[in-house]
Each structure stands twice: as C-alpha cells, then as structure tokens.
Image (tube, rainbow, N blue to C red):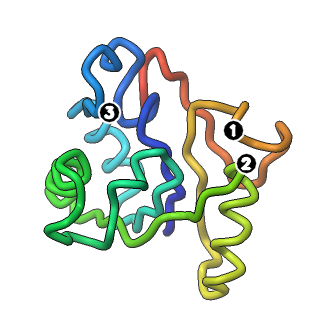
Amino acid sequence: MFIFLDIDGVLNKESDWLKPFSLSSDCIRRFCEKYREARIILISSWKNGFISSHNEKNTPQIKELEAQLDRYGIRIVGKVCDNRYRDYAVRDYLKEHPSIKEYVVVDDDIKEYSSKNIPHLRLVDSKVGFR
C-alpha cells in the first residue's frame, strides 16, 4: 500500500507546532500500526528536505522521520512535485507511476485540495494528529 502523506497535523498535532519540524511518537506509532509495511510518498512541505531514501543529504527532520518509521518497517520512497493543489500532485505522481493501484492520501487540511471530493483521502484532525 502506498500512502501520500502530509506530516504536520498528521504525524504531529497543532500543539507540537511550537517547535518546527516536530514529530509525535504516539501519532507515528498509531499511523504505523494502521498502515503496516506502507510505502510513503511525501505530499507535505517536508518533502523539500527529502532527496531519496536514507540519503545523507536529507534534512535532519527527514532523517529523524525515517529513523522513526524504520522501527516499523515503513519507508519513504518518493515525493510529489510542487503543484498548486495536492490532488493534482497526487494525480501527476500516479500518472508517472502507473503500477501504483492501491493508495491512500492522509492529510489534515482540505484547503490544500481543489475540491472536497478527493478519492482515497483520509482527513485527520490536526488537533490530535493521526488516530
């Protein structure tokens, strides 16, 4: 299963945002327990710090995220290109990777999408993060 993943509001919660690039181990644990063996494609602004899986040039926050996901056997395998709306970015990624058939989009902010009717979207409450 592939997961198009936002980070802020999903793997952390609003109260964590006082410290930039923070992660919540509870949110990560719940996410990883739900999506075992998932392959992550970043749609978050965090994607700008991702070069490739376990690349030494990834930003410190991506390295920390990878370390926490590694504990559960989950890897970041890609990132979407910048686009005005995330659903367009997901669509473009899927066109470039036609072998991806099973996927979920996990995000906390519907305003990042062109409409409110997005296939495969699971919205998360940013106040509590992934549950």
Q: Please give the name of the residue rendered at 63% of the width and 72% of the height, measured from the top-left corner.
A: 93
- Report the residue marked by disc 1: 112
Q: Please give the name of the residue rendered at 33% of the width and 55% of the height, measured from the top-left corner.
A: 49
| Mark-to-mark CA distance, 2 and 3 | 25 Å
Image coords of residue 94 (percent x, y): 67, 75
Looking at the image, tell me whether mark 2 or mark 1 is earlier in sequence order. 2
Tell me the kind of residue under disc 3.
Cys
Q: Nearer the viewer, residue 67 or 103?
A: 67
- Report the residue marked by disc 3: 27
Q: Residues within 10 Å of mark 2 (few under 14, many from 20)?
A: some
Image coords of residue 12 (percent x, y): 35, 29
Tell me the kind of residue under disc 2.
Tyr
* Closer to viewer: mark 2 or mark 3: 2
> Is residue 29 depicted above or below 90 in this figure?
above
Image coords of residue 23 (percent x, y): 26, 33
Q: Please give the name of the residue rendered at 29% of the width and 63% of the height, measured from the top-left corner.
A: 74
Image coords of residue 65 (percent x, y): 23, 49
- Report the residue marked by disc 2: 85
Mark drawn on residue 57: none
Q: Quadrant of residue 109?
A: top right
Tell me the kind of residue under disc 1.
Glu
Secondary structure state at the residue bearing disc 3 = helix
Q: Nearer the viewer, residue 59 or 76?
A: 59
Looking at this view, name the residue that lies furthest to the bottom.
Answer: 99
Secondary structure state at the residue bearing disc 1 = helix
Looking at the image, tell me whether mark 2 or mark 3 is earlier in sequence order. 3
Q: Please give the name of the residue rendered at 62% of the width and 35% of the height, measured from the top-left corner.
A: 123
The reply to whether the C-beta atoms of the residues labelled 2 and 1 are less than 8 Å apart is yes
> Is residue 93 depicted above or below 70 in this figure?
below
Total numbered labels placed on residues in the image? 3
Q: Residues within 10 Å of mark 3 (few under 14, many from 20)?
A: some
